[in-house]
Image (spheres, helix red, strand yellow):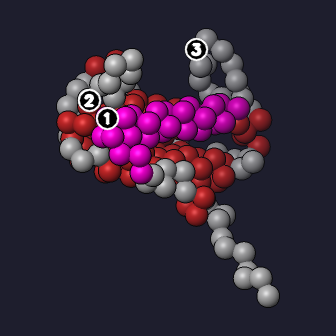
Amino acid sequence: MSPEYFAGVIVRDLRGVRRELEEYPSESDIWRLAPGIANSAGTLALHIAGNLQHFIGVVLGGGSYRRDRDAEFSRRDVPRSELVAQIEAAIVAVQRGLAQVSEAALDSEYPERVGGHVVTTGEWLVHLAAHLCYHLGQIDYHRRLVTGRGDTVGTMAIAELRTARKPPAAS
């Protein structure tokens, strides 16, 4: 697995988050909580954007983003346009950050301790991709739950993978 593959999958899923946010009929639905659901789609979008801008954009890419994890979970009623802008900023941070990572670096220690633990950069990137996918699924479920609409928005579109192409037509 190369840094380019990680970037491709993470960017694809961030685009899925953007599509999910754009599909909510109203901004208030993005923030609505249902019984038994602790986080709204807005909260999850802020968390995803902050997480990736920090762990990839800052730590691996040397960016200047300053994460406020508490605000990711406490801010409310952030306009959809700002949420989408944060997702777009995360896309740029991932692309720039992973462009600076060599394939050999994937087996090296990640430059920052995570939860008091030392992990390799590659293993941490797998975790970050899985973490994003987990929350993307929650957002998709939240949208369906609060809007009553079960339609898909192509959340994890195979065609958006960097290497995706259609095979030649069968003869």
Find the distance from the CA under tag 1 to the CA under tag 3. 33 Å
- In the image, which residues are magenta? 123-151
Front one among 69 and 34: 34
Q: From where the camera sits, is residue 46 visible? A: no
Q: Main secondary structure of the magenta part?
A: helix
Q: Quadrant of residue 64?
A: top left
Q: Residue at x 33, y 29 (%)?
A: 40
Give the x, y percent position of residue 55. Answer: 52, 32
The answer to whether residue 6 is magenta is no
Q: Secondary structure at mark 3?
A: loop
Write down the residue under mark 3: 115
Image quarter hosting the C terminus: bottom right
Write down the residue under mark 2: 32
Q: Residue at x 59, y 54 (%)?
A: 8
Give the x, y percent position of residue 90. Answer: 43, 44
What amino acid is labelled 2 in the image? Arg
Write down the residue under mark 1: 146
Q: From where the camera sits, is residue 123 visible? A: yes
